[in-house]
Amino acid sequence: MTDARPLTIEEPRLATRRRVRRRLPRHVAVTMPLALAGLLSLLVSGNALRPFEHITTIEAKMASKSDFFQDPEVRRLLLKHGIRVDIHRLGSRGIATQSLKGMDVVFPSGQPAARLILDELNRSVDSARPFVTPLVLGTFRDYAETLRKRGVASAQRAGSGDTLYYNLDMAKFLALIEAGETWNGIGFDDTSERSNNGRVLVRTSSVCESNAAGTYLSILAFVKNHNRAPGTNDPGDGAKGLDATSQEAVLELAGQVKPLINLQGMASDEQAESYFSALGESIAPVTVIYEHQYLAHQVDHVRKHQEQDTGRVLLYPTPYALTEPQLISLTDKGDKLSELIETDAELRDRAIELGFRVRFSGEDGTSERLNAFLREHEIQVPASNPDQTKVDAPDLDVLEEIINHVGDCPPPETETP
């Protein structure tokens, strides 16, 4: 007969302790489902498909087009290719006139700043011009209608309902500004239930920093110089290059242009933020922005409210200016981003969704895909202005003279990478 050892009182306690040890601590039990959910989210987004892949961080100075690289979907698409972009925000001309040390790429919003940078580098670099966007004036319906009734603007035809777009005759518009007209003086209080005795002016960002402000300045100078770029000859006089117009004459023109804008010390994307804010109309009736910023706002408004924002409208200046952002590589890491931004189909598609006219095959190609996207989302498509006069920007040295005179800009830094 086998001896049966009596069970001591301590053994059940030991067994209980062993069972307790096998249980997960409460905080671990709670966090495990959250961790699994986070992992699933990363897997769906594509950010954890190759968890041990090296991520290359690219240091970049960017102006208003940084909003493309700050878009969450663009960031996700870049991470799929192992790229993260660390953005240092600065206006386009600020990028061109300050040190580029430590940067892998720069992305000025227009060609004048890009040319300044390329001239300073004085060597061959990789670059890409992935999209274009027109410079426009953001305003509000009562102001646009006031200008239309005055014969300064004309409404673009809309399929149904109120139009979102107007064509603006810049020569007539500048005549109002130069005459010191007020909004009530040109009939705003007759068009609107409100009153505004403020002067007719356009709010811009700093010309010393911003491509948008510099481009608008080029429009003003072009119109004031009888639709010719300042510092150049009349094409019919047979002369070539710079004519006898002296520096004093260029500065005299700059002096005439300076009172025509209401300068602000902010970047052009901050101008757009003010315009789209709830207090946008009280901040400034007319503001210089880019078309893509307005179209992206309309896409977002339709998504949230199932209708267009018909209170905010665009004025398309005649003559017009098309801005061409240029991504300029400064290092081997920058070369990788430059190539990707020009060749990746998903990034091009996302640019269209953000309102850009992406380069495909000529200017018509840039608009066709964007127009199709807008129709798909039931947003009015901007019509081509029947007057296709395009602003010829002044030579770079002449434009710099005008900008420095209008903005009293500090001298540029000279250090480059």
Image: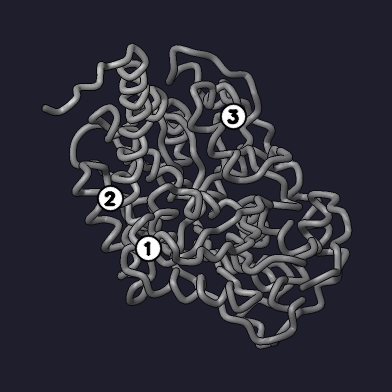
Task: Count residues near mark 3 (Cα–Cα under 10 Å), then give few for <14, some for 14-19, many for 20+.
Answer: many
First reached walking from the N terminus: tag 2 or tag 3: 2
In the rendered image, residue 54, in percent from the top left (x then y), is placed at: 50, 66
Indicate which disc residue 75 carries. Answer: none
Report the mark closest to the observer, 2 or 3: 2
Gap in angstroms between the C-alphas marked 2 and 3 = 43 Å
Residue at 61% across, 32% down: 200
Image side of residue 102 versus residue 408, left or right:
left
Percent of width and height locating residue 79: 43, 59
Residue type, label 3:
Ala
Q: Which of 122 and 338 is in front in this view?
A: 338
Question: Secondary structure beneath disc 1?
Answer: loop
Query: On the image, numbered disc 1 is attached to which residue?
Result: 50
Q: Is residue 237 visible?
A: yes
Give the residue at x 30% y 38%. 37
Q: Which of 165 and 39 is in front in this view?
A: 39
Q: Which amino acid does label 2 sit on?
A: Val
Task: Name the disc covering residue 44, or none.
Answer: 2
Of callouts 3 and 1, which one flags the residue occurring earlier in the amino acid sequence?
Answer: 1
Place residue 309 in its image quadrant: top left
- Position above or below: 203 against 214: above
- Residue 80 image offset from top left, x and y in percent: 39, 62
- Looking at the rendered structure, the number of numbered marks drawn on it comes to 3
**Image spot of residue 289 (x, y percent):** 53, 45
